[in-house]
Amino acid sequence: MLEQLPAVILLAPLFGALLISLFGLRERRACFPVAFASLLIALASAIGAGTRAFTGGAYDYFIGGWEEPLGIGIVLRVDSLNGLLLIAIAVVAVLALIFTIRPSSEKDEGKTAYFYILFLLLCVGLFGITITGDAFNLFVLIEVSALTSYGLVAIGSSRRCKMAAFHYLLMGTVGASFYLLGVGYLYLKTGSLNIQDINTILATNAVVSESPGVTTAFILILVGIWIKMAFFPLYGWLPNAYSYCPSGSACLLAPLMTKVSVYVMIRVMLSIFGLEWVFGHPGWSDLVVWLAVIAILAGSIMALAQREIKRMLCYLIVAEIGYMVGGAWLNDPNLWGLTGAFYHILADAMMTLCLFLTAGIFFKYRGISEIADLDGIFKKMPLTSIGFVIGALAMIGVPPTCGFFSKFYLIRGGIEGGQWEYVAALLISSLVNAVLFFRIFEIAYFGKKPAEGHDHEHNHEHEHEHEAPAQTVLPAREAPLSALIPLLAAAALILLVGIFNGQIVELIRVAFEIPSTVVSNLR
Amino acid sequence: MVEFFLNTVKPHFNFWVYVILMMVGLWSLIAKNNLIKKMMGLAIFQTAIILFYVSLGVKDGATIPVLEHYGDYAEKAEPAGPDASKPASKPAPNPASMPAPAASNPADAFANPVPHVLMLTAIVVGVATLGVALALCEMIFKEFDTLEEDELLRKIKALHDDA
Amino acid sequence: MILSFDIIILIFLIVAAVISLNVKDLLSSAMIYGIYGFLICLLWAEMGAVDVAFTEATVGAGVSTVLFIATILNTRRKSSD
Amino acid sequence: MNPKIFASIAVVITGLVLLYGVSDFPTFGDPRSPANSGVEGGAPSTSLYYINESYSATKVPNLVTSVLADYRSYDTMFETVVVFAAGMAIFAILRCVGKDDGAVVAPQRKSSIDGDHNRIIVGMTCRLAVPVVQIFALYVIAHGHYSPGGGFQGGVMLGASFILIALAGNLEDALSRLSERSYMALAALGILIYAGFGVLPQVLGKNFLDYGALQKILLTDGPEMARSHSMLGVEIGVALTVMSIMFAIFANLSSRGTLKGGL
């Protein structure tokens, strides 16, 4: 039974979604338990499959039993990289699911069943993307996750979410199409779709690997994935899509969609083309790192200019994607950049989940969406505030949290790779995050009557513009348990991922085939 | 010019057309103002990709990838078949420009099935995306009473300023 | 595969695509998109991809066009481009 | 920036990148290209394997069907899931739009293919055509092993026959034949059938979607025929999902999610 786990990870949420669509429309109360149970099964099997990869190394699961010759069937490959990511996805999905127990308004209640079906199918897509070993299958699963996420964005009742979803759909489809085209170019040059097989051919056959077709394939795939992950010049869809969609969807989409795309990029660089091929092209690494630097700076600056909490977080995501893409492309000799980038995927999933959960709680139970309306919220909702503070500190990069360690690895990679502009951008971005969040802390802790500082003048202006009746009417009341449990669990996970960074990094570096002695030097 | 056409374009004619179609689709996807026109551009963009894939699998002189059309070939491919004595299928007629071993390989009689399989998937994915996009178009029309992007952006901006 | 046939259909394809994207009446545009779909279906049948041609005839030319028309009739028929 | 200028720049750059790749392609129709027969000096490509071996392994002469429904059946399953997900996304977007939208719906037409005198020609033609379309669709599904066709094509045709009823008469006619409850159930059932054919081998100790293990259940001579029969089952599952979702998409789009009135 143990060897069936890679398939079970996908099948559990799939069957959950089917069950809900068979019975959930009539019996709305049944939706949540079914979804929760199927995600718990998926989490358990992800842990099982991951543990097997951590202890015994990478292994393959041949769908349909088609093993020989390689590439005739579709293979699922679990190694310690995607083992970690599988567990992270399952954990985030379970926590985000708990947050959705209460529908935010009555109008959404009729859509409960559809929401859970889409939620589970999105998880199916993300799990599948993570473990598949076939380049074309990756496209199909990207489309599964993409179509469901369009639905999840558009399911809200806000007027603007439809337009945001439409733009998201256009960009997402173009991105996926570019990826598909890139796979086609690769297929034309290598005659294979299996990731391992393509990698072998590119590594051994110099005629193929140096041909313009393969270079074009790489560029197409990379651009396609960049569109999907909202990398800097192509980020336009993200802030609208994530800030106008309902809170429940945002808590699943924001932590996972872009991170999984970053993982796909790392997988393409590492497993399809191979790092030697990618970094064998002089100038590419510098170019992408410079793009990432611009992404980080632009994301941070635009985050400073936002008045709404969710939009600010969205621009922070743009900056974080800059961290990860830049880190993956640092090309430093010990691959600390790539390690940091992957570690940051896990860390950022937890941090984003934590912050979006807080934003969701503020919006859902207090009706607050603007930063300026947060005054005095720490006294009214102390437990929520603890979660928020931990998430914010992780975003800034304060030591016990995972945010600090990922920045540490990334900066180390930057220094070893000699990419000083990247190091500078990271530090500036941390500073900006500190300014951003301490501004919020000040408002939230001291309330409306601050001492001085131009930030507060700014806020005063808005307080006159936006009279917020919700916050004055509502009594001092903590958010319900269904929101607090995932939030505090996410906060705890931020600390745990931070504290156990050594073990996680060791697992990551096993997948990069770097001897663990290098790792032990660090600790 | 003629030489360029004969040497560069003609051997890859399908691929040139796919690039042109794709660019037509991409251009209208970005530049058109009407959301439904944008979707048509996207649909054409996707068919261009399908054209590219299908062109990969074409072999000169090959038939469709259904073995029944080469009945005796199917018998031959079956190792334990009773009619193993039947003569092997005649190779498909090949143009003289093809390398010699092509004629000796019976597999060259059938088009490559893999791109076809992949593209069946891609077509269905395309129509699924189209359906979702058109549903979104209807909802956008219901909310804003227009499908022209510039008007939509103006109305959304007005909404933002009111808030 | 017959090259001259191939070339003729491909040229028609480009023409159909450009026209369907440039007609201001969306309903006619959708119909020309249907023509485009059947042309490309013909092209695939000609290139030996019968299964793809079949799917394109039902999905691409058939259902897609119907969906376009359903949406256009429920929204607005005229467009500015 | 003016979108047309931006579009032109983007299109020119993309086109040049693509043509740069095309310059290096093998000649169109070359049977020796890497995609058709493998990299020079390397192993033969998978397509050659399919052409040479798949008949003996699956007993299905249509290579596209055997690759689609057996070798790459995992892809096909998720393709069906994509259709299902699209259907769910559309319902989530359009369905349950509330009671205030009732006014927007066009007044219900009296015409119907059942006993309508205003549209007698259309109604009669539709009555004659629909059964033929459906029979042909079933043939396409069942005969996909031997000729072009299969679950997707047949499923779309079945869905199109309901769309035809909705177009010729009105949406209620079609919905009385395939109601919302039944199309939701059929869509889920289709994927359940597909995934069931995947899970059964797992129960029997083989890998997911390893149809050969179903030999004992399907009572066939060998794993080859088990694969062949399972492929038919899988295609039926695909057809059910595709049929119901295609019709449901049309029904929701044409009535703005109210499922009343139609076009």
Image (cartoon, rainbow, N blue to C red):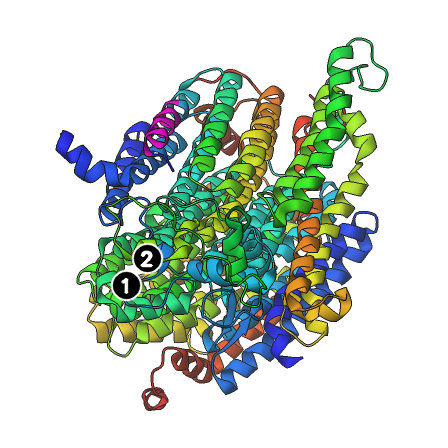
Residue C60 drawn above or below residue B105: above
- Chain of the residue where label 2 is placed in the rendered structure: D
Dominant SS of magenta comes to helix
Residue A397 falls inside the magenta stretch: no
Residues at discs 1 and 2 in contact (Cβ within 8 Å): yes
Q: Residue at x 66, y 49 (%)?
A: D238
Q: Tell me the element at label 1.
A: loop
Looking at numbered disc 1 in the image, what kind of residue is underneath it?
Answer: Glu
- Chain of the residue where label 1 is placed in the rendered structure: D
Q: Residue at x 35, y 31 (%)?
A: B24
Looking at numbered disc 2 in the image, what kind of residue is underneath it?
Answer: Pro
x, y percentage for residue C76?
56, 18
Check the image and name the residue furthest to the right.
D115
Q: Nearer the viewer, residue A407 or A378?
A: A407
In-image side of B133 versus A186 (left or right): right
Q: Nearer the viewer, residue A447 or D42?
A: D42
> Which quadrant would the N terminus of chain A be assigned to in this image?
bottom right
Tag 1 residue = D40
Tag 2 residue = D34
In-image side of A54 versus A286 (left or right): right
Range of residues picked out in magenta: C3-15
Residue C4 falls inside the magenta stretch: yes
